[in-house]
Image (cartoon, rainbow, N blue to C red):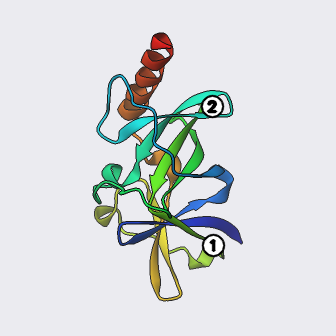
């Protein structure tokens, strides 16, 4: 059994492995960024570290997340591609749903031509189609470099 945190984004339900979730936080307006990649909407402090805030709706081309009483940040610890280094981001989502226990055989692959590289597979839960994210593959190398530059610029302006 594997545990996944599910969250809602627009009309879709996504799941991420709980091992990558560091914290779920209530929405607060992120600090503005000096230079902006489209989906990086600001910065926030997390355990004495400044991390980028990602509008997951923009990143996944589902439309910007509109903040309301259910909107939260999910702070993730991600692996840099081809490195042992990790980095943290806060993803903005419409709401958190549940933590689900999924058997490995419940996770169904999606044919490569129909999915972005960061979708690991899918499963059905109570008649709902859930997309499981491979969170380490959501951001390209170029996007990670751009986020690093935003953080560096923000530290220099402090």
* Residue 118 vertical placement versus 4 (above, below): above
- Residue 44 coordinates in the image, percent (x, y): 53, 35
Q: Is residue 35 above or below residue 65?
A: above
Residue at point 40% right, 52% down?
A: 56
Q: Quadrant of residue 103?
A: bottom right
Q: Which residue is mark 2?
A: 84
Residue 133 vs 83, above or below: the answer is below
Q: Give the residue pinned by disc 1.
A: 104
Secondary structure of the residue carrying numbered label 1: helix
Residue drawn at the location 58% of the way across and 46% of the way down:
76
Is disc 2 surrounded by few (<14), some (14 to 19) or many (20+) residues within 10 Å? few
Expressed as whole percent of the image width and height from the top left, the position of residue 144 reads 43, 32
Residue 37's mark? none
Placement of the N terminus among the 4 image quadrants: bottom right
Image height check: is 79 above or below 100?
A: above
Assign a secondary structure to mark 2. Answer: loop
Q: Residue at x 36, y 68 (%)?
A: 111
Residue at 68%, 33% in the rendered image: 47
């Amino acid at each position: 059994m594997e545990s996944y945190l599910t969250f809602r984004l627009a009309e879709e339900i996504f799941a991420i492995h709980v091992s990558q979730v560091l914290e779920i936080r209530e929405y607060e307006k992120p600090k503005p960024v000096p230079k902006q990649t489209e989906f990086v909407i600001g910065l926030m402090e997390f355990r004495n570290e400044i991390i980028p805030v990602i509008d997951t709706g923009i990143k996944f081309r589902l439309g910007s997340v509109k903040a309301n009483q259910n909107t939260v940040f999910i702070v993730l610890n991600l692996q840099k591609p081809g490195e042992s280094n990790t980095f943290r981001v806060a993803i903005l989502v419409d709401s958190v749903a549940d933590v689900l226990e999924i058997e490995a055989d419940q996770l169904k692959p999606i044919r490569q031509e129909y999915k972005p590289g960061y979708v690991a597979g899918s499963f059905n839960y109570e008649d709902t189609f859930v997309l499981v994210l491979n969170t380490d593959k959501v951001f390209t190398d170029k996007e990670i470099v751009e986020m690093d530059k935003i953080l560096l610029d923000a530290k220099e302006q402090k």
